[in-house]
Amino acid sequence: MALSTTLLLGLIAGGAIVIGLPIGRLKRPAPQLRVTLSASAVGVLLFLFWDVMSAAWEPIDSALTAVHEGDGSAGPIVGYGALFIGGLSLGLLGLVAFDRHASRASRADRGSRPPVPFQEADTRTAPVTGVRWSTAKQLSLMIAVGIGLHNFAEGLAIGQAAASDEIALATVLVIGFALHNATEGFGIVAPLAGDLDEDGQAQMPSWRFLVTMGAIGGGPTFLGAGIGHSFTSEPVSVAFLTLAAGSIVYVIAQLLGVVAKAKRADLVAIGLLLGILAGFITDGIVIAGGV
């Protein structure tokens, strides 16, 4: 399959993430809906964590099996183990460092700026890439980064299937990943539903912001498809999968803290169930293709 066709498949699979983005523009949703949406996002992320960790652990599991059967050595175990630990640590601790930096910058910025009307600036924001973003937007960015790392690995799978002229497999992968990415888009914007400033005014994200988050989360699928068409690298896949897993762990912890404040265990449980089922159902389509 030609590279141009492979890139088109990657664009379709990654671009599907925009389907779930409009949910972020819900204006003042009911508190019950807001809790359910956030919990559903956690459910999607829990599935993604299981998915990426399973894929990242597979090479180590194969190496351990080979040693047990007397056909392997400790080298691959050490190498892949180092990538696994390093990627997971960097993904998790990297977001911790980012969050601390953003918090310090926010405090310093509030102390140095004169008061302004809330229409002009959100008092609960921090400078991120030159723009003052709310806490919800920062969390949305973290989710997009974690999902983007995960989707890069998915793009590699599409590219490798296309390069091997496995057209049927590549097609099934694109359909499955496209459906999967639609649920991930919802996960990215869930924290934005009902985002309020200190005056209780609704803050609706702009379409430009949503498209940017979609590009961060879905764009790596396109990039991975192009790279996967040229060469195959299991270590690269392990590195990106574990980076994604570490990022997802941190975001899950943050979102759980948000939904716990509502003290609605019933809605949280329903949302978690819906998110997890959505992840498994869409992933089942990929598995049905023989992956």
Image (spheres, grey):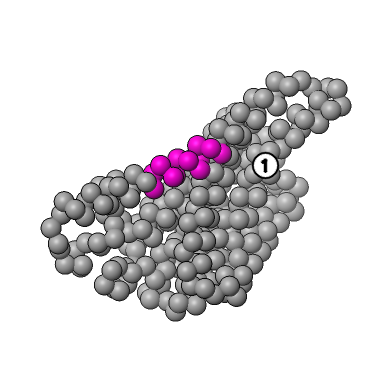
Residue 202 on image: x %, y %? 32, 72
View extreme (left): residue: 114
Residue for point 26% across, 52% down: 107
| Most foreground residue, 266 or 46 | 266
| Majority secondary structure in the magenta region | helix
* Residue at x 42%, y 68% (from the top left corner): 193
* Residue 91 sits above or below residue 249 on the image: above
Q: Position of 186 compared to 170: left or right?
A: left
Q: What is the total number of numbered labels drawn onto the structure image?
A: 1
Q: Amino acid at mark 1?
A: Ala
Residue at image coords 58%, 59%:
44
For the point 65% across and 50% down, the residue is 50
- Say which quarter of the image contains residue 58: top right
Q: Is residue 94 above or below residue 36?
A: above
Quadrant occupied by the C terminus: top right
Horizontal side of residue 37 vs 194, given as left or right: right
Specify whether residue 98 is in view: yes
Dot 1, crowdedness within 10 Å: few (<14), some or many (≥20)?
some
Magenta stretch encompasses residue 151: no
Identify the magenta region.
88-99
Q: Is residue 28 left or right of residue 87?
A: left
State which quarter of the image contains the N terminus: top right
Image position, residue 95 (x, y; %) = 44, 44
In the picture shown, does residue 129 fall above or below 181?
above
